Image: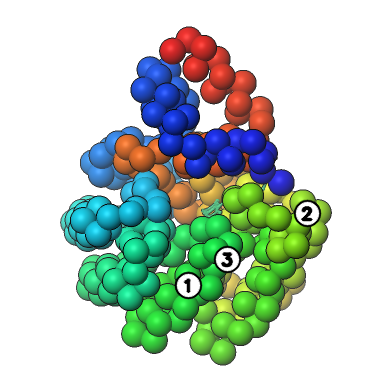
Amino acid sequence: MPNRVLLAASRSKRLESLIVSTKFTRSVADRFVAGETLEQALAAARTLRSRGMESILDYLGENVRDTDEADLAAAHYLRSLFAISSGEMDCHISVKLTQVGLDISFEDSLDRMKQICAKAQDMGTIVAIDMESREYTDRTIETYRRLRANFDNVVLCLQAYLKRTAGDVRDLLPMKPAIRICKGAYDEPSDVAFDRSATNESFKEIMSVLLETCPYTAIATHDQSLIDEAKRLSRNRQIPPSRFEFQMLYGVRRELQRKLILQGHRLRIYLPFGNQWYPYLMRRLAERPANLKFFLEAVLRG
Ligand SMILES: Cc1cc2nc3c(=O)[nH]c(=O)nc-3n(C[C@H](O)[C@H](O)[C@H](O)COP(=O)(O)OP(=O)(O)OC[C@H]3O[C@@H](n4cnc5c(N)ncnc54)[C@H](O)[C@@H]3O)c2cc1C
């Protein structure tokens, strides 16, 4: 499970201002974040495309408390969609609902998502909804249901570490949902979340149901055993490549990314950009304590 101290640090505003103002920590962030501007993110997406990988643009930001900020985030996504369509790339976008105002108003954040989905539909691309911590799960699923009633181009992220997720998948199956399944990146207590090995079992079971039933599934993991299981399931059940893709995070397990492409699999890279990189970076450090060494060296230098 992710490191709890680092996940707690990801929510500290005091640490955030210390760390973002430290010169060398920016260089650590660069490993996981494609740049501060849309242009830098699109340049990274083009480079990935030249290597056979597609992208998902994530404009960093979460838990906005102000309506203007939520409007600005939505406007930024609309601009990103326009730029994607002019660049002729197979690029999705991924949105956190708290970035478009879920903490302020459910209905207003839903309206912003409707605008984003409508624009993405016009542009022929897909909007994924990130899943945040457990207090948002119900509202995120409800947002997906309401969007799905009008749009085909929406993907919902679900987290295998939550004990409720297999039930959520069962409830969603009648609408043939498009799901991105991941392990989950937040600090959740043991009454709602599995430990590491049960999370992997849960991931395998959910992935099996999704691959069997749904028109599109995104398998978002860098875990070799889960990737092998996905390959085995798709081979044994003759699930065509058009029905699923692997997804990984920018800067994580680049060798494995290249290997999947050489083996002929579809791979999409989640490409975060923007200047609100602190909580995202801390979650990536929490997933792999070995990353912390480089980070602490940068803080000390900085
Ligand atoms: C495309 C995509 C979208 C995601 N969206 C969400 C979301 O909406 N909500 C959410 O809660 N989580 C999301 N996640 C994060 C996810 O939940 C996990 O926290 C993350 O993917 C690590 O889990 P893992 O499956 O790779 O397995 P792990 O067991 O954590 O990792 C497997 C191996 O991958 C390598 N690795 C994993 N993470 C790192 C890292 N940060 N740095 C270096 N090496 C690493 C290590 O070698 C590790 O042994 C997303 C992940 C991906 C790939």
Residue under the point 55% across and 58% down: 133
Residue under the point 56% across and 89% down: 174
Q: Is residue 32 visible?
A: yes
Residue 241's spot in the image, x, y percent? 55, 67
Q: CA distance from mark 2 to mark 3?
A: 16 Å
Residue type pointed to by label 1: Arg
Residue 183's spot in the image, x, y percent? 65, 56
In the rendered image of this protein, does residue 204 appear above or below residue 254? below
Residue type pointed to by label 2: Asp
Q: Which residue is mark 2?
A: 195
Residue under the point 53% across and 54% down: 247
Q: Is mark 1 within 8 Å of ligand 1?
A: no
Q: Earlier in the sequence, mark 2 or mark 1?
A: 1
Q: Which residue is mark 3?
A: 158
In the image, farthest residue toward the top: 301
Residue type pointed to by label 3: Leu
> Given this view, does label 2 or label 3 mark the residue nearer the observer?
2
In the image, farthest residue toward the right: 197
Please report contact status of discs 3 and 1: CB closer than 8 Å, yes or no.
no
Under circle 3, the secondary element is strand
Q: Which residue is mark 1?
A: 139
Q: Considering the image in quadrants, where does the C terminus appear?
A: top left
